Image (cartoon, rainbow, N blue to C red):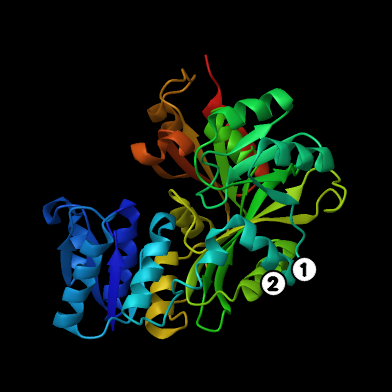
Amino acid sequence: MNFVFISPNFPVAYRHFCQCLASNGVTVLGVGDCPYDGLHPELREALTEYYKVDTLEDYDQVLRAVGYFTGRYGKIDWVESNNEYWLEMDAELRTDFNVTTGLKSDEIYRFKSKAAMKEYYEKAGVPTARCAPVTTFEDAMAFIALVGYPVIVKPDNGVGAVATYRLENDGDAEAFFAEKPDVPYLMEEFVPGEVTTYDGVCDSNGDVLFAASHITPNSIMDMVNEHVPCYYYVDKDVPADVEAAGKATLKAFGAYSRFFHLEFFRLTADKHGLGKKGDIVALEVNMRPAGGYTPDMLNFSQSADVYQIWADMVAFDEVRHSYDGPHSYCVYTGRRDEDDYVLTQGQLQEKYAANARLFTRMPDALAGTMGNQVSICCFNTMEEVEDFVHTAFAVK
């Protein structure tokens, strides 16, 4: 089996995907813009061959790279990056090389456009917020008259909460339109809720091979725009209503042979037209792993190896490893360098040494959203999680 992995070096943890593929007997062929000598040694060992391009933004260069691999190794069986930024290029490459193990160019739209997602949520029976395309100021004000303030504006095709804003009044709306980026935007009614996810891997029939759920109590948008404390945690087990909504969503979207990261709101207050406090409401789908160190957190929480589970799906369309260890809450805190905390990173790690799983730094490209100083710990109770978060973010 010939697998082309796009940008296997970023994030750095993605080397584990390549290692697990190689351990399953897959020929792993990397395409990236990092010099070969700059690759992690474990990644170099896992790759059968690596083709460096000047930039992954130049599709012709990437096309030539995959063409070279085809000539050298035969038909390409998989093309994947597991990276939101490159999903459309992945699909284009599959189309050009007739790779049938993933989405092609005419299928990717429903997974990238937040507006297109609404139709599939309706098929899944999962309620979703009303929205309208942001075209003119007059059209926006008509939508606001229908749903009321606050409203959310966000790119129709975007990652996470980047360039997403909450408008509280007419002044905010006027300011947004004065500086609006020249890309398609959506306006949505505000949904009071905390983000809860359904993360995992599904096989070629869309059946779930592994799933877990993580919860983000603070607004992701406020983490990005206001730099409120960035933390979230993986639940011990997937709540039944999240699992039901997640599986229905996967079926409606026709997802298969993928890592998935589905986001929902759990309402923190009644919302007319959407549900009662505690109900699940759709947010968006992502056909790739959750960002940052979340895959590692899933492993820590569930005593699993999602890199290997995904590689087993690719090579065998089933999980061939057993994972039956204990489950725990796994919590992430992303502290910012500009804040003066009571405990240094070293002191925090020492205090929670028995619970510590990973203390490191976030790459600069992700630090604006996720914080600079990464602390990941596991606990048996939510009281311990809350104590850790309070301690981590205490400032002088």
Crowding near pointer 2: few (<14 within 10 Å), some, many (20+)?
A: some
Spot occupied by residue 44 in the image (x, y as percentages of width and height):
17, 62
Query: Which residue is under mark 2?
Result: 248
In depth, the one of 289 and 355 nearer the eye is 289
Determine the CA span between mark 1 and mark 2.
8 Å
Q: In this rendering, is residue 369 above or below 341? A: below
- Picture disc at residue 341: none
Amino acid residing under circle 1: Gly
Q: Which residue is drawn at 42% across and 27% down?
A: 347
Q: Quadrant of residue 171?
A: top right
Q: Quadrant of the N terminus?
A: bottom left
Spot occupied by residue 158 in the image (x, y as percentages of width and height):
51, 49
In the rendered structure, the answer to whether residue 263 lies left or right of residue 366 reads right
In depth, the one of 61 and 200 nearer the eye is 61
Q: Is mark 1 on a helix, strand or loop?
A: loop
Q: In this rendering, is residue 364 above or below 51? A: above
Q: Nearer the viewer, mark 1 or mark 2?
A: 1
In the rendered structure, the answer to whether residue 173 lies left or right of residue 335 reads right
Amino acid residing under circle 2: Ala
Query: Which residue is under mark 1?
Result: 125
Spot occupied by residue 182 in the image (x, y as percentages of width and height):
49, 41
